[in-house]
Image (cartoon, rainbow, N blue to C red):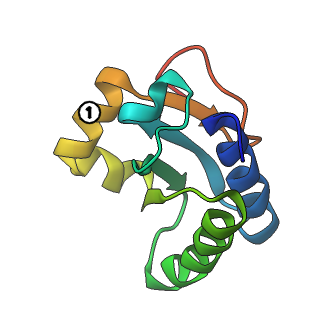
Amino acid sequence: MINSVDEVILKLSTAFNLVFDDFKGMYLFGIHTDGKIHEGEDIELAALFNIEDKAKREQIWPIIGKIETEMDVCIDLYPYTEESFKEDEDIYEEVMAEGIFYNKKGERSNSCQQ
């Protein structure tokens, strides 16, 4: 069993960097911002890419599924470009209020801003 959300994000970031040249990092938001695993709760993430389209999503979901299975977690990932992220007002406002940014290496940032 994993000990922290950071482990999940590091594994995701590593996988995304292997597949995508345009992965920029991700925001953690929701109940898991305390860094702990909350059984039965999805890990909510907003991942940023230069390009976000159907082809990218088709590549993302198998990666998510594999990590969910390996780590016994549920991940709710929203892929965005920076522009589409800002346009999704509900998610954007929640993330900016409480989210934690992880750079493309999966390292936690001290602030919510990139």
Classify residue 22 as left or right of residue 82.
Answer: right
Q: The C terminus lies in which quarter of the figure?
A: top right
112 and 36: which one is in front? 36
Left or right relative to 99: residue 103: right
The number of callouts visible is: 1
Residue 46 higher or lower than 65, as above or below = above
The residue at the point 72 percent across, 47 percent down is 1
Q: Nearer the viewer, residue 6 or 52?
A: 6
Q: Is residue 7 visible?
A: yes
Q: Residue furthest top?
A: 110
Amino acid tagged 1: Glu
Which residue sits at x=47%, y=38%?
38
**Location of residue 89 (image quadrant):** top left
Where does label 1 land, which residue? 94
| Residue 90 point in image, percent of width and height | 17, 43
Q: Is residue 100 above or below residue 106?
A: above
Above or below, 81 against 6 in this view is: below
SS class of the residue under badge 1?
helix
Locate residue 72, reporting x and y percent.
62, 59
Q: Can see residue 80?
A: no
User: Left or right: where does residue 57 sit relative to residue 63?
Assistant: left
Quadrant of residue 10 within the rendered picture: top right
